[in-house]
Image (cartoon, coloured by chain):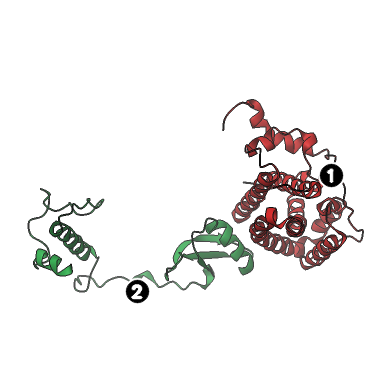
Amino acid sequence: MTLGDDVLAMALALADDELVIGHRHSEWLGLSPFLEEDLATASIAQDEMGHARAIYAVVWPDRPDRDALVTLRPPAEWRCCALVEGDAQPWERHLVRHLVYDIVEGHRWSALAARDHVAFGALAARAGHEEGWHRRHAIGLTGRLAVVHASRMQAQLDDLWPMVGDLLTGMTESERDRALDDLVTTLDEAGLVAPATTPVPGDRTTRSAAFADVYQSFTEVAALDPSATW
Amino acid sequence: MPTYEVFLSEDGRESFRHAGALDAPDEEMAVLYARETYVRRGEGSRAWVVARAHIVEVDPSDLAVTAGRTQGRNDGKKIAERRQDRRAAAAVVVGREVAPIPGGNPPPNDAGRRSAPIYGGNLSRDASAQQ
């Protein structure tokens, strides 16, 4: 199977985003305000990392050691974006990011499946099923919290908004419009107001300052002994 | 947050069993948390989420059996023993060894086997009749 460069770039961007946001979600394990949320966060984090793994298998069929793709890949080869790289503090920032990210994620899978249905159709369907739950969780929780903490949630959204554009990288104009329409409508449903500026997709060639931190975190154990067999 | 009780039914089974409890702000979130907390690995194909406040508990004193009453009590042990005896006897008739049931009766002809069946019927005949 040969994938076009543009499809590969989109796929790798999604996979790296999934892996990194999965790690950022996991920073809340054991720390969420209540147990049920701890479990839901763990579950969502694992789903996202599972998606990353599945995409890596398509992007690099000749590199069966998926762990090495994460723990031994140099930072310059990563294609994640600033939105997922940033740390997950405080809790409302983590929640608003989870909401924004998961609303657009469904559209990213659809875009991938539209480019190459053979490679990504089945994966997109599977991921879409899980994404439906992530969306419901994100909308449900942020919506309820926004009732009492509207300004805190809104402040996080305003702050994250300039980074939203990278979630749309590689999409056609109509795909972008569809994703943004959905995002604005869903944020409204959750009691938040999307800022007026239209997010602009970047080229994902550089990592944000926060990447070094999360990269160090998910590579540090493997770095102790790169030759170890896990 | 209110507490909800979660009940699951395995695929193809009619009965629901209690899986556990959870706290959630409301029913809609309780449904989401029920899935993430108790059904992540397909432990059930159907689930009920019930607000604990909606459960009506019967006063335990209303459940106490009348003192000294013996008729109509059945803990199922005798029926289970009879079934195992019959199965063992049937295996002897067809010349098949029966593996001991963990924690259950010893296999037929075992030294520890009780001499008289609890049920007065002819086991061999019963067993052949079943074939």
Residue designated by label 2? B62
Q: What mark, if any, has residue A204 been given in the picture? A: 1
Position above or below: A132 against B106: below
Please give the count of numbered marks on the rendered protein: 2
Between residues B44 and B129, which one lies in front from this camera angle? Answer: B129
Q: Which x, y percent locates residue B89?
A: 14, 60
Q: Which x, y percent locates residue A133?
A: 65, 61
Secondary element at tag 1 = loop
Q: Residue at x 83, y 52 (%)?
A: A170
Q: Which x, y percent locates residue B67?
A: 23, 70
Q: Is residue B108 left or right of residue B18?
A: left
User: What is the C-alpha distance between the residues marked 2 and 1?
Assistant: 69 Å
| Residue extending farthest right | A197
Are labels 2 and 1 on one chain? no
Q: Which x, y percent locates residue A178?
A: 82, 64
**Is residue B1 in view from this perspective?**
no
* Crowd rating for badge 1 (residues with CA inside 10 Å; few <14, some 14–19, many 20+): some
Q: Is residue B89 left or right of residue A60?
A: left
**Is residue A149 in view from this perspective?**
yes
- In the picture, which chain is red? A
Query: Mark 1, chain letter?
Result: A
Position above or below: A171 against A15: below
User: Please, what is the three-letter code of the amino acid marked with disc 2?
Assistant: Asp
| Quarter occupied by the C terminus of chain A | top right
Could you say which quadrant of the image residue A68 lies in?
top right
Q: Is residue A73 left or right of residue B2?
A: right
- In the picture, which chain is green? B
Could you say which quadrant of the image residue A149 lies in?
bottom right
Query: Mark 2, chain letter?
Result: B
Between residues B31 and A215, which one lies in front from this camera angle? Answer: A215
